[in-house]
Image: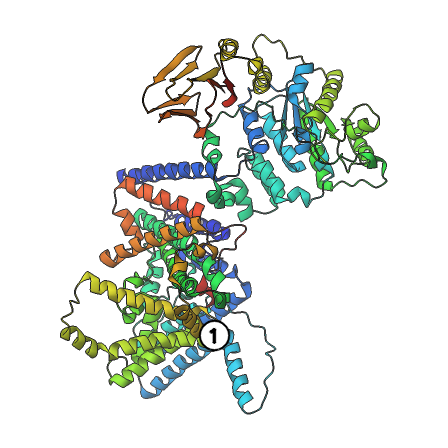
Amino acid sequence: MMRHSSFTFSFNTKGTKRLAAAAVFLVLAAAALWLADNILRAKFIGDSTTIIDGFYAEKKDDIDLLVLGSSNSFCTVNPLVLYEHYGIAAYDFGSSSQPMQISVLYLKEALKCQKPAVVALEITMLTSDPISSRREQALRWGLTDMPLSADKLRCIYQSVGKLDAEYFSYVFPVFRYHGRWKELSKTDYTYFLKDKTNYTKGYLETQAVSALPVNLDDYDSEGEAWFAQENIEYLDEMVQICRENGIALLLFKSPRAGWYRYETEAVRALASERGIDFIDYNELYHQELVALDTAQDFRDEEHLNDFGAQKVSLHFGNYIKERYALADRRGEAQANSWDEALAYRQRRGWQEFMAAQSAKECLELLQDDENYILIVTYAGAGKTGRTEQWVYEDRAVAFHRLWQENGMVHRRLGKSGELVLIRSGKVCQILIDGVEQYQAGSSWNIIVYDRITEEITANLYFEE
Amino acid sequence: MQFTSFAFAVFFPVVVLLFYVMPKKFRQLWLLLASYFFYMGWNAKYALLILTSTIVTYVCGLALERIRDREERRQRRKRMAALIASLVINLGILAFFKYFYFFHDIAAAAAGVFGLEIGESPLDILLPVGISFYTFQAVGYTIDVYRGTVRAEKNFIRYALFVSFFPQLVAGPIERSGHLLGQLEEISRKRSWDFDKVARGLLMMLWGFFMKLVIADRAAIVVNQVFPIYYMFDGAALLLAAFLFTVQIYCDFASYSMIAMGAAGVLGIELTANFEAPFFSRSIAEVWRRWHISLSSWFRDYVYIPLGGNRCPRIRKYFNTMITFLLSGLWHGASWHFVFWGALQGAFIVIGDALRPLKARVQERFHMRVHTFGYALLQGGCTFILFMLSFVFFRTDTVRDGVYYIQRLLARFDVWSLFDGSVYYLGLDRKDMGVLVLGILILTGVDAYYAVKRAFFDTLVREQCLVVQYVVTTVLLVMIIVFGVYGEGYDATQFIYFQF
């Protein structure tokens, strides 16, 4: 007769209660660790953190062109340019120095919630060596914020090569970043609560210009291209995935110093062997088909800035439009998220009300926009002059105070902002999220707070 | 593998899970295999040394038992021979691996007196982890069987597990055969899942990890900064480093014992308590009844009492005390500064005992109220200071360094440097120092609880209501993960006691 196992736990009342108690504890502990992890983990703002979070904030099956790769991808292709000029709904789903195995992961993860018609891979990292592909920084950038999945676990193993403490620290980043407790900032506490919409669609905006003109003249130097076998295998995996899903895969190379014609030809050979397209903006630059200004269009030797990205994106959009049957998404019945992103960009740029000559004119230009909150202050001349304040919200006066004695008013501003109006000994203070915004001296002050961007758009002073 | 390693985080749950699901009759074998696997994580070859110790003491134990059954004078000689054989082989292995260089240096120095020269040792001996612990445990067993206080263990697997039981294998507590062997026998018969024991075990482990990762390894940063170049710091920094080294070594060692007790508790086995809030002691003698109890009691039972213990003339008693503590010092390390440290402990106790009549007279003459909190605090403070200063010799490389350290501490003491912010340049900035102070305060609270209730952290938590239990446990868990000194950029300090 078989003996029973010695595991004698029974589901009597006491046992069930204990099981329930243990479960409650585990949930509590897991929640505490989740919170600690979210606060402590490094936040790569403008890079993978906001790119990944923004990607998952997108509507399902809404992206037509998915751009993968290292920082060269999201510093080169500006999806808003592609949308504005060609109606292409694109998203830059990359991370800095993104090794090929992580690009494969990004593709797999993307296909779980999107059905792009075209995937464009920036191929800088195709030419990287295995040591660069395992550089910790590149792995952390690429993996930290990617949601946990079987594919991610596999990718971590491909990147780390063993199941050890290091592997575990990629699965639970808190074990790598716990030492950050000393350097936490407000962003660390609030980021995970904020709206994750990425209004640049993954693109990294910058108008910084390289201190020295970037040298693209060595393009014709001689040499021999070399690809790590594992990178070729990852490329083949991407080709396979795209074929299985009916997606056109396109390889592209951003313009940069230190890229040579022999590399262009080697990548072209790889691409043509696999029946996929390849476009190289270094080659196009030398063919004078893209008029890049090496003194103005680069952030540094390897990355374009907004000016360069605008030029390349215009060409890239046209190339894609001609080659692939992508729908023009402009003018859809309902505004899509690219329309919203354009509007968002518009709101952050120069606007007519900023040129107003008087408070009255400014208010007239702003009064119809329900997404602006206006904090208006009138300070009369002289020591005995009256101080009066208004807060306009939803196109109406939400608050009005004629200050006659010292006091303080505390209001919520937009979704998560905080506004404090203080009158102390005839001195007026306006604090927004703890930062002083008001300077005395002019009769009128109008602070324009944008609910959409959750930023102060303008802080204007008028004499009349 | 270390308790704070990733390997242990995987190893322990697997061992526990399989332990509880497998048939009872395989459990001893399973724990034995697990224990050897655990030990071989350091150096696979040295597992042979444990096996040798195990076989020798096992066979000697059986021989002693067999001979005892035929009690004759001639047999007594044989029993003595069996005991001596076990002691010589086991202590010989220990002496070779641990004290070879020490004896080599003594021989070289002695030869130098006569103008002879002994060259560098051609041997390259690496100290096997935990050899002092398991050797003492195995030797203790042989002596117990010789004395007839325990029966020889006939089941080899059980005995091998007794010598190598992984929670306490490399840093104690040094278990007595009478306490542990019986429990190991029970796990293959009747021990099964006990929720309360498992929960308590896990709580003890958690507290152990807190002491190790949050306090000991953080204190170690200052200690490792100051001690190697102590001659560059002033008295205040030296005092702080000496204090933090005392905290470090206590937390380091007590945490290991706590994790060992907890891990064994999860498996349903109760280990001997090794530290009972020693800094709440009012004399050095009391410290040694509460500090590393399993070692102190080992020396008491197998060295001090056989030498005559207390039941002999006062001078002889003092001699016994000094011999015991000199050996204890030597056990802690093969170096003169450890021997000196041991001698200091013995001297404190001897002087304390010798001055007791004088102290009683002074108390009587000045009508001192000795049963007051203030007096207890004074005694506790003095005891701690003496203990702390003695540990300077434990940490410095030589006795001479220790003497100079204390001279410098006293002669160059600038109180102001404790308050002018310079302490934040000793390796821990203001925030880290804040966490360390918080950790020490929590530790003091938990130890104070022990001093009052004679119960550990697990009882302290378990006697609270469920909500408080959950909150305390979760907060501690998060504190360990967040404030723990571990991971890249910093090599978690090895448990100090492994080298002993």
Res. A304 image quadrant: top right
x then y, percent, for residue B114: 55, 92
Amino acid type of the residue tagged 1 in the rendering:
Thr
Colouring scheme applied when the structure was drawn: rainbow
Residue, x 49% and y 51% (percent of image)? Answer: B486
Tell me if residue A424 comes above or below residue A96 in the rendering: above
Res. A259 image quadrant: top right
Circle 1: is it few (<14), some (14-19), or many (20+) Cα within 10 Å? some
Q: Which residue is mark 1?
A: B398
* Residue B419 visible in the current orientation: yes
* Residue B267 visible in the current orientation: no
Q: Is residue A358 left or right of residue B76?
A: right
From the viewer's side, name the closer residue of A80 and A242. Answer: A80
From the viewer's side, name the closer residue of B296 and A364. Answer: A364
x then y, percent, for residue B274: 34, 63
x then y, percent, for residue B422: 45, 56
From the viewer's side, name the closer residue of B359 and A352. Answer: A352
x then y, percent, for residue B101: 53, 77
Tell me if residue B343 comes above or below residue B260 in the rendering: below
Tell me if residue B417 comes above or below residue A391 in the rendering: below
Q: Is residue A92 left or right of residue B235?
A: right
Q: Is residue A337 left or right of residue B383?
A: right
In the rendered picture of this protein, how many numbered marks are placed on residues?
1
Furthest-bottom residue in this view: B114
Q: Chain of mark 1?
A: B
Q: Secondary structure at mark 1?
A: loop
